[in-house]
Amino acid sequence: MASCGLLLLSCPKIAWAHHGTAAYDLDKVVTFRGTITNFYWMNPHSEILFDVKDSHGAVQHWAIETHPPTMLVSHGWTRKALAPGDQVTIT
């Protein structure tokens, strides 16, 4: 276990790479209306799973990553903020 920690400390670009925004188009905003299928309240990032119907009525499964629970709590969220079956609009 200690060797894994040392490896991560010696390779900070690898250890922290998932916090970059290079994979995202920050100039494009999309909005989805759908139904929650699951909400995972967990570290390091909570996840929201939801289904959206496309223009042909077919269901598309989506997942998004949110802030960690500590940050969500500071904005009024709880682990019960979203439940399967809830209708949501996500931007």
Image (cartoon, rainbow, N blue to C red):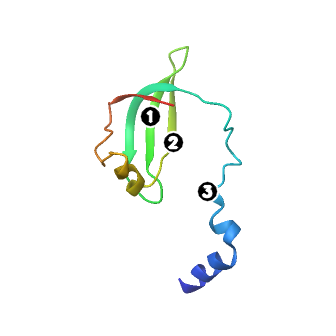
- How crowded is the residue under tag 2: few (<14 C-alpha within 10 Å), some, or many (20+)? few
Locate residue 43: give its quadrant: bottom left
The residue indicated by pointer 2 is: 64
Image location of residue 9, percent across then percent down: 63, 78
The residue indicated by pointer 3 is: 19
Q: Residue furthest bottom?
A: 2
Query: Which amino acid is tagged 1?
Result: Phe
How far apart are labels 2 and 3 at the CA level? Answer: 14 Å
Residue at (31, 41) in percent of width and height:
81
**Of marks 1 and 2, which one's residue comes earlier in the chain?**
1
**Which label lies toward us, 3 or 1?**
3
Query: Which amino acid is tagged 3?
Result: His
Image location of residue 35, percent across then percent down: 39, 29
How far apart are labels 3 and 1 at the CA level? Answer: 23 Å
Residue at (44, 34) in percent of width and height:
50
Query: Which amino acid is tagged 2?
Result: Ile
**Of marks 3 and 1, which one's residue comes earlier in the chain?**
3
The residue indicated by pointer 1 is: 50
- Are the residues flagged by discs 2 and 3 in contact, CB closer than 8 Å? no
Vertical relation: 87 (above or below) 20: above
- How crowded is the residue under tag 1: few (<14 C-alpha within 10 Å), some, or many (20+)? many
Residue at (53, 83) in percent of width and height:
1
- Are the residues flagged by discs 1 and 2 in contact, CB closer than 8 Å? yes
**Of marks 2 and 3, which one's residue comes earlier in the chain?**
3
Q: Residue furthest front?
A: 74
Q: Nearer the viewer, residue 55 or 89?
A: 89
Image location of residue 16, percent across then percent down: 63, 64
